[in-house]
Image (cartoon, grey):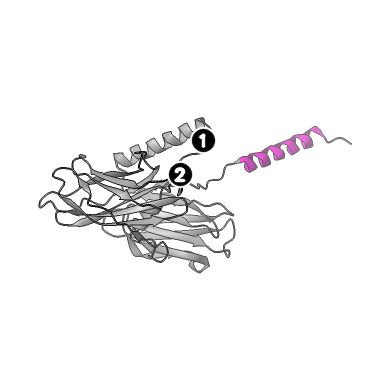
């Protein structure tokens, strides 16, 4: 006996609905995601987490010590320091669970706190979330537009999107203890300074991960009256070819007679390539610059 037309229509509708649900893309992002906090009543943003995977939350303001996390005993790792937070759920959390996270900020600017809903997924998680409490600067917006355009061009050309940074920001925020990712002091010859640069490189350290590395240069501003506003940096090989940049974390303007660190994250070079590398750092006007040459990054 063949099914009646109404029954057949119902079956087709159910199949179509199931296919639509199945085809919905996952909301989790393995790359870099951005959230802008808004004042007033608004649903808390959702963040994907997964047992055994680390999710890094990077804030643009300092966090207050008190953090409220629903189900905290069921997390293997919860670390909050300065402007960053690391979350790694344990297997005690089941897919589909929704947990509330509330953080508070130092200072008096609004909003004073922010809440998020952590949604548990199986083998999928947001790996790095940049969270902005204040309106983003034009430089930040332009950098994101440039990154999206680069990803689009890579997609159109059938190439994988470029790797994303994040390690430098975690190091700058003190997210790792030295024994977790031990730094290696680098010897360097006297830097080549631009005329009138009035600065001194106090320390250079190297952090090596599986497919990337981070250089930390601690710089003293010897100018008696002007702050030092570092703008960017690049790492180049012996042939002058730059290593692929992933991120540059800049210090706040360095006051006269004070020091600060710039963190430069690049792809890890092939260990079989000969030669040494150079680090070039420049300020906003590209006047107070310095170059460190002969660096061994292996």
The image shows residue 114 at horizontal and vertical percentages of 38, 55
Give residue 108's quadrant in the image. Answer: bottom left
Give residue 149's quadrant in the image. Answer: top left
The image shows residue 222 at horizontal and vertical percentages of 14, 53
Q: Could one spot residue 142 in this view of the protein?
A: yes
- Furthest residue toward right: 1
Judged by its main secondary structure, the magenta piece is helix
How many numbered discs, if any?
2
The answer for how far apart the CA atoms under marks 2 and 1 are is 12 Å
49 to the left or right of 42: right
26 to the left or right of 67: right
Dot 1 corresponds to which residue? 159
- Near mark 2 (Cα within 10 A), the count class, few <14, some 14-19 or many ≥20, is some
The span shown in magenta is: 3-23
Q: Is residue 4 above or below residue 221?
A: above
Residue 19 is a magenta residue: yes
Q: Residue at x 51, y 65 (%)?
A: 75
């Amino acid at each position: 006996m063949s099914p009646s037309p109404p029954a057949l229509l119902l079956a087709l509708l159910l199949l179509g609905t199931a296919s639509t649900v199945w085809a919905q893309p996952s909301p989790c992002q393995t790359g870099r995601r951005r959230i802008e906090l808004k004042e007033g009543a608004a649903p808390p943003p959702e963040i994907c987490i997964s047992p055994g995977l680390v999710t890094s939350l990077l804030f643009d303001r300092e966090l207050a010590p008190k953090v409220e996390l629903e189900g905290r005993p069921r997390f293997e790792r919860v670390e909050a320091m300065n402007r960053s937070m690391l979350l790694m759920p344990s297997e005690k959390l089941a897919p589909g669970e929704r947990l509330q996270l509330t953080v508070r900020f130092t200072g008096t600017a609004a909003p004073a706190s922010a809440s998020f809903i952590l949604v548990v997924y199986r083998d999928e998680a947001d790996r790095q979330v940049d969270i902005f409490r204040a309106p983003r600067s034009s430089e930040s917006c332009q950098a994101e537009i440039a990154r999206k355009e680069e990803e689009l061009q890579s997609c159109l050309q059938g190439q994988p999107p470029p790797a994303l940074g994040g390690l430098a920001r975690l190091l700058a925020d003190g997210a790792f203890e030295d024994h977790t990712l031990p730094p290696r002091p680098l010897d360097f010859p006297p830097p080549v300074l631009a005329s009138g640069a009035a600065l001194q490189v106090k320390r250079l350290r190297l952090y090596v991960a599986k497919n990337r590395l981070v250089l930390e240069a601690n710089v003293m501003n010897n100018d008696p009256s002007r702050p030092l506003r570092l703008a960017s940096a690049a790492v180049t090989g012996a042939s002058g070819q730059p290593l692929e940049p992933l991120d540059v974390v800049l210090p706040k303007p360095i006051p006269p007679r004070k020091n600060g660190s710039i963190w430069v994250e690049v792809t890890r070079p092939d260990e079989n390539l000969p030669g040494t590398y150079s680090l070039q750092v420049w300020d906003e006007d590209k006047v107070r610059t310095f170059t460190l040459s002969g660096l061994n990054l292996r």
